[in-house]
Amino acid sequence: MKKLAIPLSLIAIAAVATVGFLLIQKAAKTKALIAEAVPEIPASKIQPEELLQRVKKSSEQAKEGPEELEGLKELSRLYHANGLTNEAWKCYATLIVADPSEPRWPYQLGRILAGYGRLEEATPLFEKTVDLAPDYLPARIRLGDTLLKQNLTKEAGKVYQGVLSKDESNAYALVGVARVAIADGDWQLARKHLEQSVQATNFQIGADLLGDVYKQLGLSGKERIVLQNMEWGSYADIPDPWSLTLMDDCYDAYQVSIAGGWVAHQGDKRTGFRYIKRAADLDPNTAIYQYQLAGAYMDLNDPENAEIHFRRCVEIQPSFGDAWLALISIARDRNSPTSARRILEEGLKAAPESPSLNIEKGNVLVAQRQFEKAYPYFHRSIELRSHEAGGFIALAQAYIKEGRIEEGMEQMREALVREPANPIVLSSMAFDAIMKSDKSAADKWFKRIRQQARFLPEDLNRIESMYFEVFGTAAPK
């Protein structure tokens, strides 16, 4: 039987048609999958109205199109950014199937599951993220943390080492490796990695754990140094650009404010400013957001706009002493002492219970050598905040300027009780010992100074020079 010769062009057309048919089938299945996955809108939990309308619009787009996938993507962000994790969970689970090459979907679902303690389920999601985006280090660190919480120390250690192979000074990976070492009973190795982390982050990451390691090793002196220098409450989660972008869709001013402050603290002032401003826009009648926004403008060298928001802050909350102080500082920077004095009086009238404004008024009077008028303001600041060193230091400095040295040093000793690591207090105690030619006491204070991380090099050099001039030898190291 004679075979029919089918032209190549017809074969090609048939192949294209077949591929097209399969793609249409796949698209139809994906569309149906997305439509079925759209969560029921929990309208009673969603505020403000703008967010609710955006959720409704994205839900409708995901169900009806056009671009159903884009609708589901936005819906996932809206739900996740605003704490509606059950709904976000369902969106992400569908996106993982509908858009399998995008690493953000398993990553964000993994974060939600890990947050609920469902570590075994989160682990493969973080592993998938690492496979899809091997250079996104936050995913690797979260994977290591998740494994470590399951006591899979060997596996976690490999993950952290993988991070360090790409970024040898990554503080979060160093802390992770240290935790693995602690689990293995290797306290010296843990100490090594934690000291690297603490040094790299100025006591922000790993300091609390390093204190525990020093305690375990019997190094009480080093433990004390760490506890004195660490910033309590300063730790924050892993810098995570993928998660940070959720703040663009977040309507919780507090969460947006925290994110903006942290990003700015890490050095990205522009991005931090954007989120800080968003927080103030979301809740314009809360004083702290106006104050934070004013500070962000100052960081960007824009005192004119900063002044507007410091003013708005004290309009909302007249007792906000730090905002009054900032306005005084702006006036002084403009060489306007009359304006500065007027703002100070205005601030004290509005916020008489502000310790910082009382200190400021006292300092103004001391500059005018009106010591007896100044002292009541310093005493008042101490009454208002007796657990802090600031009022005692201000009073001490006033006594010293008047020539009442011993009374001043007595107040410095009171300040030392409140803040044993305060650089001003320690340098004042060292200075007093040097001026009295008491080498033994000066050496004692220098020993304490050397243990602190908060001393500026220029301040330390100045005290060292004084020591050398008086005693003829270098200050003890």
Image (spheres, helix red, strand yellow):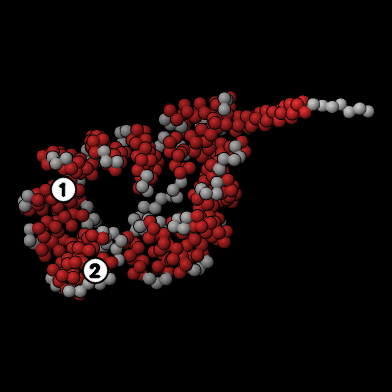
Disc 2 secondary structure class: helix
Kind of residue at disc 2? Phe
The one nearer the camera, 150 or 269, is: 269
Kind of residue at disc 1? Glu
List the residue tagged with mark 2. 446
The one nearer the camera, 216 or 30, is: 30
Where is residue 224? Give x, y as percent. Answer: 33, 66
Q: Quadrant of the N terminus?
A: top right
Q: Is residue 107 left or right of residue 392?
A: right
Is residue 61 depicted above or below 188 in this figure? above
Q: Nearer the viewer, mark 1 or mark 2?
A: 2
Is residue 191 depicted above or below 68 in this figure? below
Q: Quadrant of residue 278?
A: top left
Is residue 190 depicted above or below 354 in this figure? below
Question: Which residue is at 18% across, 57% downward?
Answer: 393
List the residue tagged with mark 1. 360
Label 1 – label 2 distance at C-alpha: 30 Å
